[in-house]
Image (cartoon, helix red, strand yellow):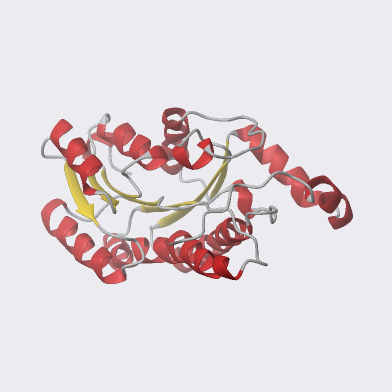
Amino acid sequence: MNSPAALRVIISGASSGLGLALARHYLQRGAALAVLARRIEPLQTLAAEFPGRVFPYSLDVRDAAALRIAADDFIRRAGVPDIVIANAGVSIGTLTHYVEDNNVFQHVLDINVMGAVHTFQPFIEPMRAAGRGRLAGIASVAGFRGLPGAGAYSASKAALISYLESLRQEMRGSGVQVVTICPGYIRTPMTDINPYPMPFMLEPEEAARRIARDIEHGLSFSVIPWQMAIVGRLLKLLPNAVYDRLFAHAKHKPRAPLL
């Protein structure tokens, strides 16, 4: 990898929460960043704070064409990136017996899974040609097992974990490494509305520091914090009957049907 001062980094979902914390982490270490999000104002604020090193792109990760235009522009202006972080994601409570939640399921899957595909896609060939770089996907421990009331989110993160594993094999021998990051709970607007206990909660700045460290080390799979790795492993080992008794009546994230 290049020195931190020379890093070129792409971060989706960079307008708030973990994405913004990751952007600030890399900027404070001298990197040049493409920051992607639907809301342009926070990206412009970041660009004003770090003149000449922030390339803001207002787009929706569901729009593959917009991602390709942004990627071509960044590569032309700054060069092939060293790190691409597919961070954009949404978490919305869902219950399958509500017909109106069908659109919510589609919305979550499109952003959390296809958004990562669209974020990586335009950079893969340039990075492969350069023979270097890291593609990092922000999944979740929620992808280890299905959580009640979070069918869309759990399914999307499980799919993302599997997708990243497939991509890792496809990139083998190319010099481009694929890193799967599975955070536990991070204090963001997305978790602020959760009505249940959230053990081992991390502040976004600390989560960003740990994620950047594991990306730098090129770990193929990382759970942050380490305590959640133990929790996740135990949950995966639980027999279905035990898991069902423990979680059948757990509190759910509030539903928020799309308008």
| In this rendering, position of residue 38 left or right of residue 172 | left
Q: Is residue 54 above or below residue 144?
A: above
Image quadrant where one finds the N terminus:
top left
Is residue 17 depicted above or below 131 in this figure? above
Q: Choose top left, top right, bottom left or bottom right for residue 121.
A: bottom left
Residue 20, percent from left and from top: 34, 38
> 34 or 201: which is nearer to us?
201
Residue 202, x across and y down, in percent: 53, 30
- Residue at horizontal 58 percent and vertical 40 percent from the top: 194
Where does the image place residue 2, in percent across and percent down from the top left? 28, 42
Look at 60% across and 71% down and name the residue there. Answer: 99
Could you say where residue 176 lies in the image, as x and y percent from the top left? 39, 58
Tell me what residue is drawn at x 51 percent, y 60 percent.
164
Total tally of numbered discs in the picture? 0
Residue lying farthest to the right in this orientation: 241
Question: With 103 as the anchor, is 45 left or right in this view?
Answer: left
Vertical position of residue 124 compared to residue 10: above or below = below
Examine the rendering and report whether any part of residue 21 can be seen: yes
Q: Is residue 10 above or below residue 165?
A: above
Between 164 and 40, the one nearer to me in the picture: 40
Residue beneath the point at 53% across and 53% down? 92
